[in-house]
Image (cartoon, helix red, strand yellow):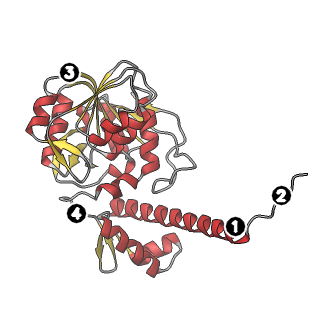
Amino acid sequence: MAFETAPDKAATASAEEEFQKNGKARSVLLRQSKIVDLVRGQGFVSIDALAQNFMVTPQTIRRDINELSEKGLVRRYHGGAGLPSSIENVEYTTRKMFSLAGKIQIARLLARHIPNEASLFLDIGTTTEEVAKALLDHDRLRIITNNLNVAVILSENEKFEVIVTGGAVRGRDRGLTGEATIDFIRQFKIDFGIISVSGIDGDGTLLDFDYHEIRVGQAIIENSRKVFLAADHAKFGRQAMVRLCNIREVNALFTDRMPPPGMCEMLAAADVKLYVAEEPLQNDLEPAGGNPPKRKDSQSD
């Protein structure tokens, strides 16, 4: 006869404590993500307004603002939070986690629009790294990238041919930039150029922080038959210093939420296709500001 022993009380208590801790951490991350959205939408938000909005104490909001300021996501002011710097990007580890659920959904949606046996450029960025993961089930892709993280991810599929550009390696995100990178890219004419950006201005200008990275992006655009832009909703209205091009110059935008009305009109006028991903997976951290529209592969033609 088999006997079932009672679970260890200490282990059970520890598991419950860990579960509560993780739940609290997710709640804090979600609130902080929404704070960033509010700051970007309004330019400045007071501590009192945020405390009322989230129904927490001003002390809690101050802690949130301090943490977000340390990560470079907002700028701390007396009495509130404002827009972050337009000349310096957020650290790679922070960018990798921010709006992660949205990036995953964008990547899966974009991957469905890449046929087997196609050739691709994938540039530097945490969103393009998620795209690389979403492409792993494809067959016989040929990929050129200046992102060593992307190269490592895609090399898991033995049927892929992965080509890494030359150039100087940036230690912070393992990206390759410089004249050697640009010269290498110019040797090819590729089916799809998949790019990401740090910000999208209200007039449709695609922005980034690094001049050298921008020049690589421009080379990818010039040498791709179709250009797909992957950008989560937090990029709309985000400020950065260096101009890549206008969004009218890409063939399609893949995002996780419907862009502002003016941007939608601009995309339609320029015949840029718009694809909005489904709402985030329940097991992923929800992006700031709630769920995106409940729709499948929303497309604006």
Q: Secondary structure at mark 3?
A: loop
Q: Residue furthest front?
A: 1
User: Mark 4 Cα within 10 Å, few/some/many (few <14, many 20+)?
Assistant: some
Inter-mark Cα distance, 3 to 4? 36 Å
The residue sitting at the right extreme is 1
Q: Is residue 168 in sight in this rendering? A: yes
Question: Could you tell me which secondary element the residue under label 4 belongs to?
Answer: loop
Between the residue at mark 3 and the residue at mark 2, the CA separation in whole angstroms equals 65 Å
Q: Which residue position is annotated with label 4?
A: 85
- The local secondary structure at tag 1 comes to helix
Q: Identify which residue, 187 or 238, lies in the foreground.
A: 187
N-term mark: 3 or 4: 4
The residue pinned by badge 1 equals: 12
Q: Of the residues under marks 1 and 4, which one precedes in the sequence?
A: 1
| Residue contact between numbered discs 3 and 2, judged by CB atoms under 8 Å | no
Task: Residue 161: give x, y in percent of width and height.
Answer: 31, 24
Work out which residue is located at the far top of the displayed protein and give it.
117
Q: Amino acid type of disc 4?
A: Ser
| Numbered disc in front, either 1 or 2 | 2
